Image: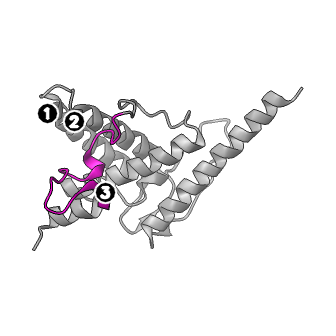
Amino acid sequence: MTTDTEQAQLALMEPDDYVVGGDHRLGGPDFQGAADPGDQPPHPINWYLLTADEAEFEWFDLDRWVKALTRTYGLPPTVVPPYWHRHDELVWELSALHTHWLNAYDPEGSPSAPLAWHRDFADARNRLREWVSTSGTKLDRDRPTRITTWPGEEPADTYAEVLIEDRDADFLAWVAEDVAVRRRIEQQARATVRAP
């Protein structure tokens, strides 16, 4: 019989990540640094500048890590809600926390770096709670973060809450749309460069 933690770790692991009776990677692939020694070291992610291919990789990498984080630390939806991916403020915070984690647990890093990460994680949880509260996203319902319209600007669109029925399906659709938009921008840029 396995514990909940062991089941969560095994669910995160791919078959190639472990050998029966062999060494298991603590935390599964989501709580590891770069899997391939040829990979670049962790670096900050600027979501505005990612290509379509980079964004697709980063979305799935971040999603795996966020799922592992919520399970490992038992984070409630008031800290990390299911539709975190639909809220820029949550994406940027979680992405920064992820790259900070990768650096803190890098084999070449300082032995005290994990303590610094946990201290920063406590601060990040407070910010996440505030942004979740402000945005209005919940465990079972979501709406886009409300944007304040400044004097002279067009009023921001208002959106109704939607029920969260299948979080993973929504995430896949969200990533597909983001990647498609980035590909269109890349194609337009290439066409502009080629134009006489």
Q: Looking at the image, which residue is at 51% across and 61% down?
A: 172
Provide the secondary structure element on which disc 3 rests: helix
**Compared with residue 127, is residue 85 higher up or lower down, i.e. above or below?**
below
Q: Earlier in the sequence, mark 2 or mark 3?
A: 3
Q: CA distance from mark 2 to mark 3?
A: 22 Å
Label 3: few (<14), some (14–19) or many (≥20) C-alpha neighbours in 10 Å: few
Q: Can you name the residue that lies furthest to the right here?
A: 196
Image quadrant in which you'd find residue 7: bottom left
Q: Which residue type carries mark 3? A: Asp
The residue beneath circle 1 is 115
Label ID, residue 16: 3
**Magenta part of the protein: which range?**
13-37
Q: Which residue type carries mark 2? A: Tyr
Q: CA distance from mark 2 to mark 1?
A: 10 Å
Task: Where is residue 56? Give x, y as percent.
Answer: 52, 48
Task: Where is residue 38? Give x, y as percent.
Answer: 38, 33
Label ID, residue 105: 2
